[in-house]
Structure formats: structure tokens, C-alpha cells
């Protein structure tokens, strides 16, 4: 027997986001029946930021990026992600 609450119909994504921020999902979804799926072509959303770096750091990043044959902005993202993973791994 399914004792789950019915998921409401939302007017927009913002309304749905607000609902799920407060709702307890197991009251609505039977996670035991959930399946793993992959979205291989889905790209994470990005946000443009302004970052001021000393010129020598930027020059060194460009040298490293050239050696790896990647754009320097991509290298910065890789370095940040590696460090974040390291920091979060140590705090868990």
C-alpha cells in the first residue's frame, strides 16, 4: 500500500524549489524504488565571477595550462575542484 503524500503541481521551478527546500521527500517519494540514471550530456550550470589575481600567479597558471594543453580558466577550475574535494574529504 502506498501511504505517500501526493506531490503538488507547481506553477514554476522557483515554487517547486521552495517546496522541496521545506518538504521531507520520503513523505512523497519511495526512495527504495529509485533507480540510478546518468545524464552524460548535462553540463553543470556556471556563474561568471570576477577574480583578481596577481599577474605572476596568472602567468604561472598560463604556463601550467600550456604544458597540459588546456585553457587556463579550465585549469583554475580543475585546481579549485581538487582542493575543494581534498578539504571536504578531510572534514567528513
Image (cartoon, rainbow, N blue to C red):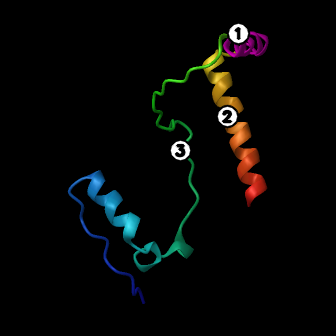
Residue 39 got which mark? 3
Tell me which label, 2 or 1, sits earlier in the chain. Answer: 1
9 sits left or right of 30 in the view = left
Residue 11 got which mark? none
Residue 61 in the magenta stretch? The answer is yes
Q: Look at mark 1 in the image and give the residue it sits on.
A: 59
In the current view of this chain or complex, which residue is farthest to the front?
A: 54
Q: 10 Å neighbourhood of mark 3: few (<14), some, or many (≥20)?
A: few
Q: Look at mark 2 in the image and give the residue it sits on.
A: 80
Q: Which residues are magenta?
A: 56-69
Residue 88 sits above or below residue 72 on the image? below
Residue 10 sits above or below residue 31 on the image? above
The structure residue drawn at horizontal position 31% and vertical position 76%, both measured from the top left corner, is 6
Tell me which label, 2 or 3, sits earlier in the chain. Answer: 3
Q: Secondary structure at mark 3?
A: loop
Q: Nearer the viewer, residue 33 or 84?
A: 84
Q: Find residue 19 and report its image quarter.
A: bottom left
| 3D distance between C-alphas at marks 2 and 1 | 17 Å
Amino acid at each position: 500500500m502506498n501511504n505517500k503524500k501526493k506531490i503538488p503541481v507547481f506553477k514554476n521551478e522557483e515554487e517547486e524549489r521552495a517546496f522541496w527546500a521545506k518538504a521531507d521527500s520520503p513523505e512523497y517519494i519511495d526512495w527504495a524504488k529509485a533507480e540510478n540514471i546518468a545524464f552524460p550530456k548535462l553540463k553543470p550550470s556556471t556563474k561568471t565571477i570576477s577574480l583578481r589575481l596577481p599577474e605572476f600567479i596568472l602567468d604561472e597558471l598560463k604556463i601550467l595550462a600550456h604544458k597540459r594543453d588546456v585553457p587556463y580558466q579550465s585549469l583554475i577550475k580543475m585546481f579549485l575542484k581538487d582542493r575543494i574535494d581534498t578539504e571536504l574529504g578531510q572534514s567528513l
